[in-house]
Image (tube, rainbow, N blue to C red):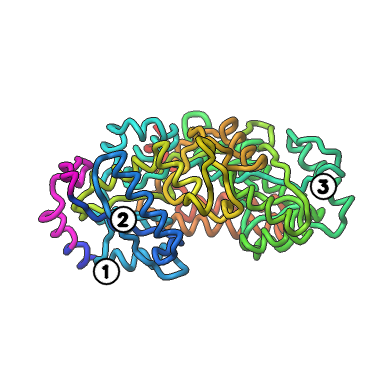
Amino acid sequence: MKRFSLTILGVLLMVSLGFANGQKDEAAPSDSTQTIRMVLKDFSPSEEVNARFLKNVEAGFETWSGKKIHIEAVQMPEGAYAEKLNLMLLGGDIPDLIYFQGGDEVISNQGLLVNLNDYAKSSEVMNKAMMDFNRDRLANYPYILWIAPPRARTAVIREDWFAEAGGKIPVTIDDYYNLFKTVKANHPDVAVMTDTGNTTRMDYTFNQAFGVSATWIRQGNSYVYCKVSEGEKDKLAFYQKLYREGLFDRDYVTTAWDSMEDKLYTNQVAVVFGTAGIILDIYENKLMENQNVGLVALPPAKGKGQGYAVSTAKETRGWAISATSKNPGLTFELLEFMATDEGQIMDRYGVEGIHFTRNGDEIVRTEKASEWWPKFHEVMTWNAPTPLMGEVGMKGWEFIADYAVGDPDFPIPEDFSATWDALENLYKEYSFKIITGEYGIDKFDEFVDKWYDLGGTDVTEYAQTMMK
């Protein structure tokens, strides 16, 4: 990797000096066609629908900008996208526009990605499309841009079992507990709720209520990591009670995202936690197909606080521009175009004639509309001419708009990465054993001591300097 880094840095000096810090390149003549190579997860350019989509984007971009482009999508092998992408990039094949879903820091640390801050700040389109947390993330880590709502997980419950349990939207922690107890009484063989290997999904609903308000919680004049806080101890005690009483799936630790969904569709659980927006609609559509039952979205529990903490450290996925690109400015213009009204119609509705039709100014979605997913952006503030989501999906977005709380987090530096992994593994071990009852809640104090001894003290000291 070090030998490759030296080679690429040499290329950067010869090829990309002058625009790697975000300065736009000169506009190409309008009568020439410039190629933008792009790589995207789960996108096969050989599929006819994807090829038609790219042709539509090229034509729309020319109308909008006056510039002709050809988008060349790179075919990626299936599975382990982040790993295969980095192998490709570290092998020297670096497209202009790169979608990352992890693994980006390895590449950005070698100076291979363009700083996008200057581009975004000078873009009227992006300033309109970006939300505050998008701007904060880009300021903290300027190599990834992702225009989409935060991936907060929203609790959803089967509407039939919810109605049987009284049909009252829970507000407090006790309300949630009583709802779960009633569902269990009505359906003794049901686990009521589940998660996927850990409690990350359900934490969105309960963290704030227990006072786990941010990654680093202010106590007096210093900060404490959330997972060694008193609020975390109280929350784990609550999860332990849910598990003990059969309200929390006893197999949650071995449950993957697909088996979580299957448990919902096959009457094994009443409640799951899904990404707010279209994902909730997918859950509901599949549940309707299997059980002819809809879903009800539930808000985050209210207690010491209420809401979904949204980290501002960095984007965990999104678009980057290669510092070796000959046309970084043009490539960013493509990202701009896809955030405009015209671009959003293409990106969000799909291919005209397949996923939607037009009736005058009206956009009519077809039966194949559910097969399409946005490839570039989901501008949350965009006023779609025809609803893009069902009631449960829109409710999830409304909850985000109403309850999103900024979390002034920061990326863990590479020097602490090994320590941080060890600390997170220690938490996973103790939290699982506490929830399942192997350990009493008093073991949490032992975990805290070990956490600090294992390197948590050094990380916490670093956090004090970053959170000022």
- Position of residue 108 relative to residue 362, above or below, is below
Q: Quadrant of the N terminus?
A: bottom left
Secondary structure beneath dot 1 equals: loop
Q: Which residue is mark 2?
A: 71
260 left or right of 427 in image: right
Q: Nearer the viewer, residue 165 or 42?
A: 42
- Position of residue 424 relative to residue 138, above or below, is below
Q: Amino acid at mark 1?
A: Gly
Q: Nearer the viewer, residue 215 or 145?
A: 145
Splitting the image into 4 quarters, where does residue 5 fall?
Answer: bottom left
15 left or right of 69 in image: left
What is the number of the mark on residue 160? 3
Asked if residue 28 lies in the magenta stretch, the reply is yes
Q: Nearer the viewer, residue 285 or 174?
A: 285
Q: Position of residue 144 (x, y in %)?
A: 36, 47
Residue 295 seen anywhere in this rendered image of the structure: yes
Q: How far is mark 3 from mark 2, CA to CA?
A: 47 Å
- Given the current orientation, which residue lies at the most extreme front position? 360
Q: Quadrant of the C terminus?
A: top left
What is the number of the mark on residue 91? 1
